[in-house]
Amino acid sequence: MIDRTFRRTVVSSGFGRAAIVIAGIACAGAPALAQQCTIPPEIVTAITLTPDAEAQLRACALENARDLDSPDAQKRRASRQALTRPLEDPNVSAAFRLRYSAALAEPINRAVASTDEVVAVNALVFAGELATDPGLTVLLDQLASPRPALRYQAAYGIRRTFGALQRSAPAIQNEQIDRAMRAARQRMGVETDGLVLQALTAALLEGASLPTAQFSQAQPLAVRSLSDGLSAHVGGAGGKIGEPGIMDAYLRGATGVRDIIAQPNVTIDAETARAVAQLGGRLIAYAVRVVKDKNLPAGPGATREQVSDSVALGQTLVQLAGRSLNQQGTGAAQLAPLIKAGDVQSEARFLLDAQQTIGANGVLTAAPFNFPDDHFVP
């Protein structure tokens, strides 16, 4: 749930009216809905649904959805909360989710297509709670929206979907999970808004937590998608310092990948290890470009600290990926303190030592990674 801390972040980042309103949606109390329709628990938890139960489900769903696209904020919020209520049952069945999603397809699509950004955002919040193939499709379609507030909520909705899959019977195909992770990876490479990039990162980290008993390939695919998506973004960042939200996404994503693959019970395959190593190399190469372009303020400071932290994470990712492939060399040691020092001599030393990892004769261009000589440093 988006909390009041996020509300302050959104306002200070100038993210937009819709995102500010959605923070209010998460925090405010719900007004009473005059004629709420309640679906009986025995229908919500039924493994199979009779025709009568389906008819009751559909009628109730459509009644509660009447105000999903209302211009009145209280009616709109009450409608969404009434629709969400049966999905909060810990025993909600996959059959119910699927029929409920089908019944609500038209009102959801109508609301998402609204020119009123707040109406569209409200509907995307609910689409994430459905945790079904159609609900996920609505979210994926909005990852390419020209409106950052809709892209943010689409990404956050993917995170909600992955969370719901961990709490109740899955009502979604494995192929759709793969599709969602690949779509998030693709969007990360071109995303320009820091908050959206953070939401995409959070979604893939949530996907990495899906239970392996039901989704055996989810964790490695999530790690690869996150690593590849951030690698593409970092690689395209040039030598400029990104806005705080983007730098935060880099750090959160790299930290999340590190924490997953460092677990003693996690084994990663060669493809995933290479993706992780590439992310590590990209983070180091990014710092090299920043230093070369003289974009780091002199002396200690928050920006230098962030770049230093990203370099430390980059080295750790390369080391962990190498260890999983039985590689012994770890590349240059202690690069981060050279960035943190903030003096000309230390930066010159950093540029030299970084080549041991990302240069033409570095760790990442040798076996078992075998990246091209100019892959990280042209």
Image: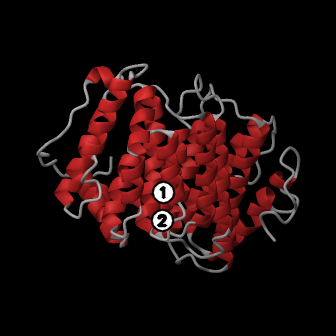
Left or right: 223 in relation to 92: right
Q: Position of residue 370 (x, y in %)?
A: 87, 51
Left or right: 53 in relation to 48: left
For residue 130, what is the image quadrant? top left
**SS for tag 1?**
helix
Residue with the most extreme bottom position: 294
Q: What is the three-letter code of the residue carrying label 2? A: Gly
Residue ID at (29%, 31%): 56
Q: Position of residue 241 (x, y in %)?
A: 55, 73
Q: Can residue 128 be seen in this view?
A: yes
Residue 61 sits above or below residue 264 on the image: below
Q: What is the three-letter code of the residue carrying label 1? A: Gln
Residue 353 sits above or below residue 315 on the image: below
Contact (Cβ within 8 Å) of mark 2 with mark 1: yes
Q: Where is residue 45 in the image (x, y as percent from the top left)?
A: 35, 22
Using the image, tell me which numbered label, if any, was put on residue 198. 1
**SS for tag 2?**
helix
Give the quarter of the figure containing the C terminus.
Answer: bottom right
In front here: 18 or 221?
Answer: 18
Characterize the local packing of mark 2: few (<14), some (14-19) or many (20 or more) Cα atoms within 10 angstroms.
Answer: many
Characterize the local packing of mark 1: few (<14), some (14-19) or many (20 or more) Cα atoms within 10 angstroms.
Answer: many
The residue beneath circle 2 is 194
Residue ID at (14%, 42%): 35
Left or right: 24 in relation to 239: left
